[in-house]
Amino acid sequence: MTSPANKYGPETSLPVQQSYVNGAYLPSKTGETFENRYPGNDEVICEVEVAGQAEIDAAVTAASDAFESWSQSPAAERSEILLSAASILRSRNSELAELESLDTGKPIAETSVVDVITGAEVIEYFAKVIQAIGGRHVDLPPAAFALMRREPLGVCAGIGAWNYPIQIAMWKSGPALACGNTMVFKPAEQTPLTALRLAEIYTEAGLPAGVFNVVQGAAGTGSALVSHPGVAKVTLTGSVETGKIVLEQAARELKKVTLELGGKSPIVVFDDADFDNALNAALVGNFYSSGQVCSNGTRVFVHAPIYEEFVTQLAQRTQAIRVGDPFDPATQMGPLVSREHYEKVLGYMELARKSGARHLCGGDAISEGDLARGYYVTPAVFANCQDDMEFVKDEVFGPLMSVLPFESEEEAILRANDTPFGLAAAVFTTRLDRAHRVANALRAGIVWINAYNVTPPEVPFGGFKESGLGRENGLEAIESYTQIKTIYTNLGGVEKTY
């Protein structure tokens, strides 16, 4: 399956897509649909049926009914099914990567090696670790003891973002299902396709009907799902604004919430750093997936002694990035995900040009040739930026890098932390003492030393401040999808009080 009118493959369109509930596709009663468009040329891929209240009710009911048996199934049984699903996902990597590129506009060079594989790794991790997760025993002599059981929560509502649709669906469903929960997942309306393939694969792997369901729609569908009384937990990847709305809705019934939200992450490069490694990290930490990555390090702080050489090489390397058709294996950067987002990013590019920062390269809409019909923007670098410039403070979520000079370690830490966000950060230095001193001082949920955007499944991921609540991946995610029950056992008598 390739993009419509794509010179790298046959023309393809898809039938109307529906929600996936209780192990099968479910037609919507709303009569409403929305268009799913290919970002590479703005052509319609398919129509998608909107899930209304009836479909949300059906999905939550199916998940609630399935929870009774799934939550009581042995961990080894759940593990076997999830490992089977991961194996199928790996075997269909090429097909799924192609569908993901069609939906998101991300280059096939990315989706074929990252999007599906990294999600399958998370499913495999939780499938294996869940059999080793137990409770605790506390001896209370002389005549009592207590057991702490770790139990699943119930029906979990997962709400995905459009930048990593299938990966996010797996990051959320993997630990949730491994722990014995069931899930109703709503993909972003811009990227509705691959979550449905994941649901089909789960069914093929032997997952009982109703354990994983997918409902389609935009904000209204998400709101109905979050507010449903049958939902015990909500996990969202999205913007800060959406996260606050979801948190407020979930708080009305004290539902558990995990929020992985936005960022404006700093990369701090000292003059003793390995120059090429820092340069490589700054580039990939800004322009991978067309800059549409929540943890991207879009504020690059560079030590004054190496600043001019660093920005010179950044500009040279950025101008050499191959922007093009996502299905061309040579393409390094594809279009932005939608026209709405494209116009937002171009607005920030214009703000940057007018800000007084030094424009080194990029930031232009591609308006000629084969790419003119798509949402393509050339990657941009601005130097000599000020911390209070609007495009430096706001999360642009596009290929726009701000490079800022600094003089001292103390200054770099103070300025790097001067943001309402706190998702990620990085420090580049060859000095071990400085590396850990700065990493300890940076206010972010994950800090890399001499690396960037490396997220193995064993490592928890999540933010400080307005970048979110809770953690995904690692053993910490088990805590997000379970609750502790204490069982106190008295081996003696009960003293007479009255």
Image (cartoon, grey):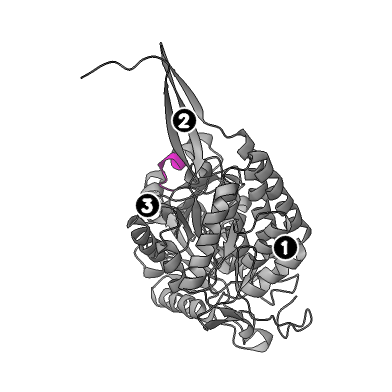
Q: Which residue is drawn at 71% across and 45% down?
A: 80
Q: Which of 76 and 170 is in front in this view?
A: 76
Secondary structure beneath label 2: strand
The part of the chain drawn in magenta is 438-444
Residue 236 at what x, y percent from top left?
47, 59
- Is residue 293 at least partly visible in the picture? no
Residue 425's label in the rendered image is none
Residue 492 at what x, y percent from top left?
39, 14
Q: Mark 2 points at which residue?
A: 148
Q: Was residue 214 drawn as part of the magenta stretch in this picture? A: no
Inspect the image, locate mark 1, and give the three-letter code of the amino acid beneath it. Ser
Secondary structure beneath label 1: loop
Please report whichever mark, 1 or 3, sits nearer to the chain's N-terminal start. Answer: 1
Please report whichever mark, 1 or 2, sits nearer to the chain's N-terminal start. Answer: 1
In the picture as drawn, the residue positioned furthest to the left comes out as 498
Marks 2 and 3 sit apart, C-alpha to C-alpha, by 31 Å
Q: Which residue is drawn at 53% across and 64% down?
A: 59
Q: In this view, does 267 lie above or below 135?
A: below
Instruction: Name which quarter of the figure residue 108 lies in.
Output: bottom right
Frontmost of labels 2 and 3 is 2
Position of 364 compared to 491: left or right? right
Frontmost of labels 1 and 2 is 2
Residue 344 at what x, y percent from top left?
46, 77
Position of 124 compared to 225: left or right? right
Q: Mark 3 points at which residue?
A: 465
Residue 184 at what x, y percent from top left?
53, 61
Instruction: Name which quarter of the figure residue 357 lies in.
Output: bottom left
Please rate how many residues cluster around mark 1, counting C-alpha atoms within 10 Å: few if below 14, some from 14 to 19, many from 20: some
